[in-house]
Amino acid sequence: MAWTLFSVPSAKRSELDGVLKDDVLSRQSQKVRDAGAMGGPSDATYVLLEGSADAMKRADELLGPVGTKLPGADAEALYRRFKDEEEAASAGMGLFFTEG
């Protein structure tokens, strides 16, 4: 699955919300997090989109004017943090449902 990661200034949050409602992008996996909570700048939002390669091209086109695509090494490290967070949440829910 292809993915892309952007940093969007908090001041452009309403524009970001509009972009994420795009017909193609709305059907992809979207994760939006406060950058400050993930070790980034406090005045930004991180956006992770996962889906088809064509959809990621569209994301690059639409998110480019709103934010900044994160470069290779930075994006890889942040992507891993998103995935670790997701796995930790899944493990926590598993424990919740198996306790008894």
Image (tube, rainbow, N blue to C red):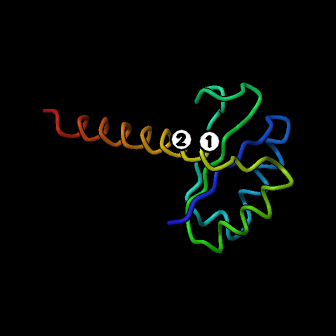
How far is disc 2 from disc 1 in space, using C-alphas?
5 Å
Q: Quadrant of residue 60?
A: bottom right
Disc 2, SS: helix
Query: In the picture provided, is 97 more to the left or to the right than 13?
Result: left
Please determine whether, in this image, residue 3 is positioned above or below residue 66.
below
Q: Quadrant of residue 49?
A: bottom right
Disc 1, SS: helix
Residue on which disc 2 sits: 77
Please determine whether, in this image, residue 10 is positioned above or below residue 17.
above
Q: Position of residue 2 (x, y in %)?
A: 55, 65
Which residue extends farthest left? 100
Query: In the picture provided, is 84 more to the left or to the right than 60?
Result: left
Closer to the camera, 69 or 45?
69
Please determine whether, in this image, residue 25 is positioned above or below residue 78.
below
At label 1, which amino acid type do we have? Answer: Asp
Residue at image x 62%, y 38%? 33
Check disc 1: other Cα within 10 Å, few if <14, some if 14-19, many if 20+.
few
Residue at image x 49%, y 66%? 1
Q: Are marks 2 and 1 in contact (CB under 8 Å)?
A: yes
Residue on which disc 1 sits: 74
